[in-house]
Each structure stands twice: as C-alpha cells, then as structure tokens.
Image: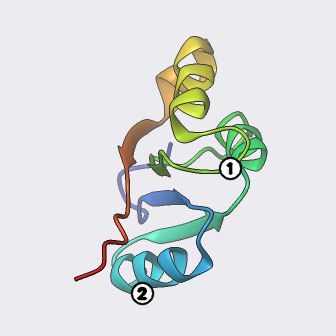
Amino acid sequence: MTDINSRQSILIVDDSVENLDILKAILEPEYDIKATTSPKKTIDIALSQNPPDLILLDVMMPGMDGFEVCRILKSNPVSKKNSGTVCYHAWRGGG
C-alpha cells in the first residue's frame, strides 16, 4: 500500500486493450496506474513487494476469469490485506 503522501495506485485487469486504454485515460491524472491483460500477472503483482491499493478486475476473461482471480486473491492473507478489489464487466451490447 502507498503512504498517505503519495498517489494511490490502481491495477486495471482486462482482456481488452481498448478497455484498458479507456480506463487508463480516465484514471491516470489522479492515480498511478498499472495495467495487464493477464490474470496470472495480476496475482503476481498483488503479491509483490509493491501491491496496488485497488484492483479493477474484469470478470469476463478467457482462461482464468475475474471471479477466480478474486477468489485466489481473497484466499491469500497477503493480498487480502493489501489491496481492495472491484470486479466489473464491460458490456459490449449492440443497439
């Protein structure tokens, strides 16, 4: 976690690079942003020496979905304590 005097960090996880770019553009002015399309890398970052303050996690991803990533993070005492997690789904509806 960051100290109170530094910018907070957010890890954005989405299999869509377009969604990552949109969220980064919105959040970068206020937060330090990390982004990945890899659920496995998400777990590695969350368990690292410098975990994000918040993880924005897409629930619909190929392979390991966001719900599984969230279960893994919440079952680990280190990541459970260090980062908040928000799951979302970017709906791509037509018409």
Q: Mark on residue 25?
A: 2
Would you name the residue on which mark 1 appears? 62
Q: In this view, does 30 lie to the left or right of 22?
A: left
User: In terms of depth relative to the viewer, which is nearer, 11 or 8?
Assistant: 11
At numbered mark 1, what does the secondary structure look like: helix, strand or loop? loop
Image quadrant in which the C terminus is located: bottom left
Is the residue 93 above or below the residue 65 in the image? below
Q: Mark 2 to mark 1: distance in Å? A: 24 Å
Percent position of residue 54, x then y: 43, 48
Looking at the image, is mark 2 or mark 1 earlier in the sequence? 2
Q: Residue furthest left?
A: 95
Residue 47: x, y in percent?
Answer: 70, 33
Q: In this view, does 27 lie to the left or right of 78?
A: left
Mark 1 residue type = Pro
For the point 60% across and 51% down, which residue is it? Answer: 61
67 and 35: which one is in front? 67
Residue positioned 45% across, 47% down in the render: 53
Does residue 35 sit above or below 85 in this rendering? below
Residue at 68% across, 62% down: 37
* Quarter of the rendering containing residue 29: bottom left
